Amino acid sequence: MNSARSVMSPGRYFGKYFASNRRGEAVAGILMASPWIIGFLIFVLGPMIASLYLSFTRWDLFTAPKWVGLDNYTNLLFDDASFIQSLKVTTIYAFIGVPLQVSLGLVLATLLNQKIRFLGFFRTVYYLPSVIGGIAVAVMFRWIFGSQFGLINGFLSSIGVQGPSWLGDPNWVLPSFILMSLWGAGSSMLIYLGALQGIPTDLYEAADVDGAGSFVKFMRITIPMMTPVIFFNMVMGIIAGLQEFVIPFIMTGGGPADSSLFLVLYLYRNAFEFFKMGYASALAWLLFIYIMVLTGLVLRSSSMWVYYEGSMKGR
């Protein structure tokens, strides 16, 4: 009787075997991911919770934080003209610079997707600016946009045109930063190049049979098939543009007359120049909410202009 009970049925045996394997795989997966999980908890989630608490306090880094409730947020939204100016500068920069950068990346990728000689060389040349550090780029563009001995004004004077004071004129400093943002189009170009390889060639062959020209094929085939990648680059570009800091910090420091005062630069000033860490934490959370809202709006708009081949087949 006892020996009969000790015999396990095949179904129960394999059930226990697979359950044990699943637990082992789960434990192994958690162990392998644990360095990232620990790093996320210590360096991301922990500081986020601390900054959320500090955003409701007045803290100068030297004395204990003092609870002030929503004062930091109300001051930022209703009494701080510099915050409104930084929000305006950052929004203009992101909403003009990012579409230009995304468009330039797509045009470059389309040109470099052709069968031409030295293709690898040209691809490397256009991508190379993306791997150069922000400080080096800022120093280089300080020379390019120099009012007296700059490269652009030197060229303009050679054809009899008086160039503006790019970084010294409040009306020209933000357009200068937008032009500089085009320097990084190589990173999006590389993603476009990969996506262009995935467009089925039979679509172009069918268009050739119908007598479509290059422009029509680009507008009717290439762009619709590339919309998921355009959407990705647009979202990532907006998030990066709203966090611009290094180049304006080095080149203008927010001037002249706060005309290049970006949000993160204003955050830095409050935290490490004015020692208003609680105020800076509130600003950081408002920036986080602003990025989330804009990203959400772009995501909602995607259903109107992003084409997914799989979803169309499912209709």
Image (spheres, rainbow, N blue to C red):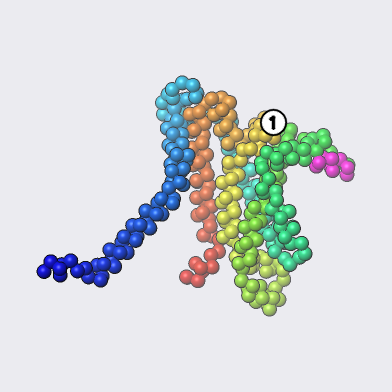
Judged left or right of residue 291, residue 122 is right
Magenta-drawn segment = 151-159
Please give the name of the residue rendered at 74% of the width and 40% of the height, measured from the top-left corner. Answer: 140
Where residue 226 sits, quadrant-wise, is: bottom right
Please give the name of the residue rendered at 28% of the width and 63% of the height, measured from the top-left corner. Answer: 16
Q: Is residue 157 located in the magenta-colored stretch of the structure?
A: yes
Judged left or right of residue 144, residue 65 is left
- Residue 246: x and y in percent read 63, 38
Kind of residue sitting beneath label 1: Pro
**Foreground residue among 12 and 75:** 12
Instruction: For residue 86, say whether it is visible.
Output: no
Where residue 172 sits, quadrant-wise, is: top right
Judge whether 233 appears above or below 315 on screen.
above
Please give the name of the residue rendered at 67% of the width and 51% of the height, measured from the top-left corner. Answer: 185
Judge whether 208 appears above or below 191 on screen.
below
Q: Is residue 280 located in the magenta-colored stretch of the structure?
A: no
Residue extending furthest left?
A: 1
